[in-house]
Amino acid sequence: MNYEEVEEVVSQISSIPTNFKIARDDINLICFYIAHKFLTNDKLPKAKQLEYATEILNYFSYRTLVLISSMYFIYPISEEKAVSLTERLSNRYLIKRVKNWNEYCEYRSKEYLNNKFLPLLKDFTNDKDLPNAINDLYNRTKDTLKNIYSEFISMMEKDELIKSKKSTGSDMTGKEIIIDKVDTPYNYFQRVEASLNDRSTFIREEYKNVTVDIVKSVSNSQLHEALELICDSYFNDRDKHKEIRRITEEIFINSIEYLQSQEVYITNSNVVSVMNYLVGNLLQARGTELKINKLKEDIDKLLNSLYKKSKKNIAPRVLKNVRNALYVYILLLGLVA
C-alpha cells in the first residue's frame, strides 16, 4: 500500500484522540493491527499465529529503539565510552541478561503476548484500552533507554571511563597487540550454557582432570557423578533448569566482580593466574564474603536436591568438596576457550 493512503485512513480515526502521539502514530497502529490479524487468522496454526504476531511486535520495538536512542544519543559515542557504560549497567537491566538488542526485542514481544494484552489484541475493539496497550510496549523500551542514558550522564559527570583496562601484549609471532581486558560475565556464561545442551561437550575428561588436580579432595568419579546429575536435570526438570542456569550465571558474575575489585582482567595468556585468584577466593572466603558464601549455599542446596531426587547418598563434607570442584569446573569450561 502507498504510505499516503495509509496516512489518510489513520487520520480519519475518531475513537483515539489525536493528541495520543504514540497510539495515533501510523506505523505503531499498523504494527498492532497486523498482530491482531495474525492472531485471529484461523487458517494459521496457533503456534504460527503467535510467531508472526511476535515478529511484527519485534519490528515495533526495533523502530522504538531507533527513535528513542537517536533522541538521547544524538551524536555517536566512542568505543571506550560504550564499553564503560555497558560495564556500569547492573543485571537489573534486561539488556545485560540477553545477548543483544534483537533478543531484547524478542523477549519484550513474547512477554507482551503472554499477559493481559493478548485478549485485547485478539479483540481489537476496545478503543479505551488499546492506546494504553500500545503505550505499554513503547514505554518499556523508552524507560530502558532513558535509564541507560541517565547512567551515561552520571558516568560522564564522575569521569568513570575504563581507561586502564587495555594494555599491550604480544601475539604468537611476538608482534605487539592491544589486549582488551574488559570482561563480560555473560560471554563466559554463554559458553557453558551452550555446552549444557550436549553431554559430551559439557562433561569433558581434560577439564575434569584439571579440576581434581586443583580440588584434591574430590575424585574424578565424584565430580563425574555430579556433572551427570547437573546435565540430566538441566534437560528433564524445568525448575532445576532455571536454577542451574541462574547459578551458572551467578558464578561468572561473582568471579568477574571479584577480579575487577582486585584489578585483574582476563586475557588469553593469563587464564592460569586468573584461575589462581578465583580458586583462592572460593576456598578462602570467610563469613564477610557474603556474595560468594551465598552462592556456595545455593550450589549446596542444588546438589543436595539432585542427589536426593536420584536417591544417591552423599556426606555433607563430601558435598562441599564436590561443590567446590563443580564451581572450578564451570569456571574452566567458561574461561578456557
Image (spheres, rainbow, N blue to C red):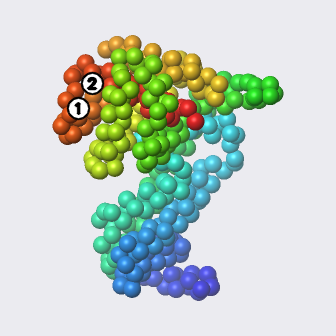
Q: What residue is at 42 percent from the left and 78 percent from the top?
A: 38
Measured from the top left, where is residue 265 in percent x and y?
A: 59, 24
Q: Are marks 2 and 1 in contact (CB under 8 Å)?
A: yes
Q: What residue is at 47 percent from the left and 33 percent from the top?
A: 205
Q: What residue is at 69 percent from the left and 48 percent from the top?
A: 75
Horizontal relation, residue 119 to residue 74: left or right = left
Measured from the top left, where is residue 193 in percent x and y?
A: 45, 44
Q: What residue type is labelled 1?
A: Asn
Measured from the top left, where is residue 182 in percent x and y?
A: 60, 31
Q: Which amino acid does label 2 sit on?
A: Leu
Q: How far apart are marks 2 and 1 (CA)?
A: 8 Å
Measured from the top left, where is residue 239 in percent x and y?
A: 27, 47
Horizontal relation, residue 318 to residue 173: left or right = left
Q: Quadrant of the N terminus?
A: bottom right
- The correct choice, above or below, for 279 with respect to 53 in the image is above
- The correct choice, above or below, for 82 with respect to 29 in the image is above
SS at circle 2: helix
Q: What residue is at 53 percent from the left and 39 percent from the top?
A: 187
**Residue 319 got which mark?**
2
* Residue with the mark numbered 1: 304
SS at circle 1: helix
